[in-house]
Image (cartoon, rainbow, N blue to C red):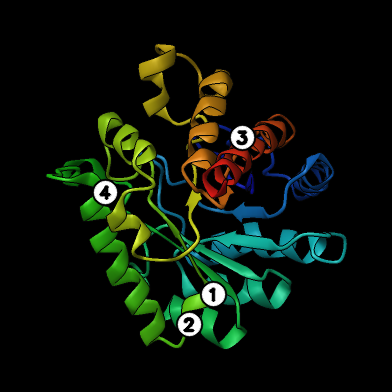
Amino acid sequence: MGVLNVTPDSFSDGGLYFDHDRALTAALAMIDDGADIVDVGGESTRPGARDVDEAEERRRVVPLVAKLAPHASVPISVDTTKAGVARAALDAGATIVNDISGLRQDAALGDVAARAGAALILMHMRGTPHDMYARAVYRSVPEEVAAELRWSLAAAVARGVSREAVILDPGIGFAKRAEHSWQILSHLDHPALLTLDRPWLVGPSRKSFLEQATGECPSATREWATAAAVTTAVLLGAHIVRVHSVREMTAVVRAADLVRRCREQAKQV
């Protein structure tokens, strides 16, 4: 999944694709570079980012989705917590809704996804990007993340979303301090997570928890650490990885997947 932030203030690529023509060019390049999904977002979720109202978020996202959809050979995802934005983006040609709140901010988003027959990504987060780190207190990160995602999954199904249409995201970097993100990344195969029996999306790309490996540095220079995190995610069963540098991470994913397949074949002998 390639990340395309149509925002002025996202933590890694804010402002790069705020112009729709430039964003369209970037999206098509991502597809050429190997992206299987393009994820379009119109509101930054970095700590301290300003809130964006629905009208502004629609203005950022929907025209781009409408321009991209006729040319895209892969699904388009809309990264939003607002039902109105999701509805407009799906009408414009998106087929996946990526909700970082796990239906905790706007439960009607589940109704929108159900009516459209869209896939729905539910991420684990506590609170909002403004207060999430104050809520980053865990006894067992995998078990608590699994329990809270189980609630989100049940909420989606109750709204009419097919269970088979749901993808789960453990929310690396969201309501998790660095040690929590490393714990969830290294325990994607924890029994509590596996019992949810849904595909996993993992998004470690360029996030600040990687500074424990790289030292303090600009987010765009965390690519080697991102590659290691992506490799780990794939080896431990992630079905989708959300990344900024699609060309480079496509090669990483393919190599990691070959290792994973060899390990699985060896177990069957």
Q: Earlier in the sequence, mark 4 or mark 2?
A: 4
CB under 8 Å between callouts 1 and 4? no
Residue at (60% x, 34% y) in the render:
13
Residue at (26% x, 48% y) in the render:
142
Residue at (61% x, 34% y) in the render:
259
Q: Which residue is mark 3?
A: 259
Residue 181 falls left or right of residue 88: left
Q: Which residue is mark 2?
A: 161
Q: Which residue is mark 1?
A: 165
Which is in the foreground here, disc 1 or disc 3? 3
Mark-to-mark CA distance, 1 and 3: 28 Å
Amino acid at pointer 3: Val
User: Could you tell me which secondary element the residue under label 1 belongs to?
Assistant: helix
- Location of residue 244 (image quadrant): top right
* Residue 6 picture location, percent across and down: 63, 48
Residue 34 falls left or right of residue 175: right
Which is in the foreground here, disc 4 or disc 3? 3
Which is in the foreground here, disc 4 or disc 2? 4
Mark-to-mark CA distance, 2 and 1: 7 Å
Amino acid at pointer 4: Pro
CB under 8 Å between callouts 1 and 3? no
* Residue 216 picture location, percent across and down: 40, 13
Residue 208 falls left or right of residue 17: left
